[in-house]
Image (tube, rainbow, N blue to C red):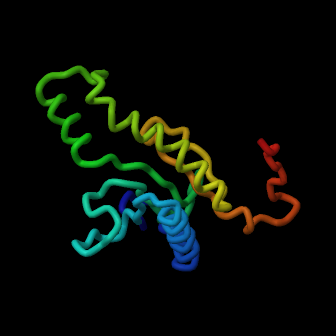
Amino acid sequence: MSEFGYPRACDQVLAVRNELADQVVLALRTAGLPAFREDTPDTPDSPDSPDGAGAVVMVDADAETGSAAVSVGWRCGPGAVQAALDALVAGSPRDAPVVRRPGTIALHMQGALIRLLLSAGFLASPEHDLMNPGHVLVFGRTSDLPPALRPTFVPPAR
């Protein structure tokens, strides 16, 4: 059982999901972004995002997923998050620019993350979820699809 009482995926399924998550982290790091797995503890000597900022790759351990088993979210630097918290504590409204900034950054990064993952051969799309509006769903690699289902669109040359 998962921590929320749902059946947990078997070890074989989790191994495939973890491998996909590792490939996503590698692709994002290759693009020059700080990227790390949510379930990997931060270590002081880790070169990737010692402050926890960057692309956070998550694996869903539930046996039944209604969507992708791997997702990516953008985490702002601690300064932007702290400024938003300080503004809320001081009584600023929820729609004040300083409060909205972390979410706005995450939404802008969502498009960039999707384009980077698509260019690296992943099947990725925005997550249409009010709780995680800036997250990206990763379904696998294009090469994992049977040839008849692989996208064939080639953008015109500029």
The residue located at (44%, 42%) in the rendering is: 132
In this view, which residue lies farthest toward the left?
Answer: 90
Residue 40 falls in which quadrant of the image?
Answer: bottom left
Q: Is residue 113 visible?
A: yes
The residue located at (40%, 38%) in the rendering is: 105
Q: Could you say where residue 25 lies in the image, as x and y percent from the top left?
A: 49, 66
Q: Is residue 133 visible?
A: no
Q: Could you say where residue 156 lies in the image, as x and y percent from the top left?
A: 82, 43
The residue located at (19%, 22%) in the rendering is: 92
The residue located at (77%, 64%) in the rendering is: 145
The mark tally for this picture is 0
Residue 20 falls in which quadrant of the image?
Answer: bottom right
Residue 111 falls in which quadrant of the image?
Answer: top right
| In front of the other: 55 or 93 | 55
| In front of the other: 86 or 10 | 86
- Depicted 28 relative to depicted 14: above or below: above
- Depicted 132 relative to depicted 63: above or below: above
Q: Could you say where residue 60 lies in the image, as x and y percent from the top left?
A: 48, 61
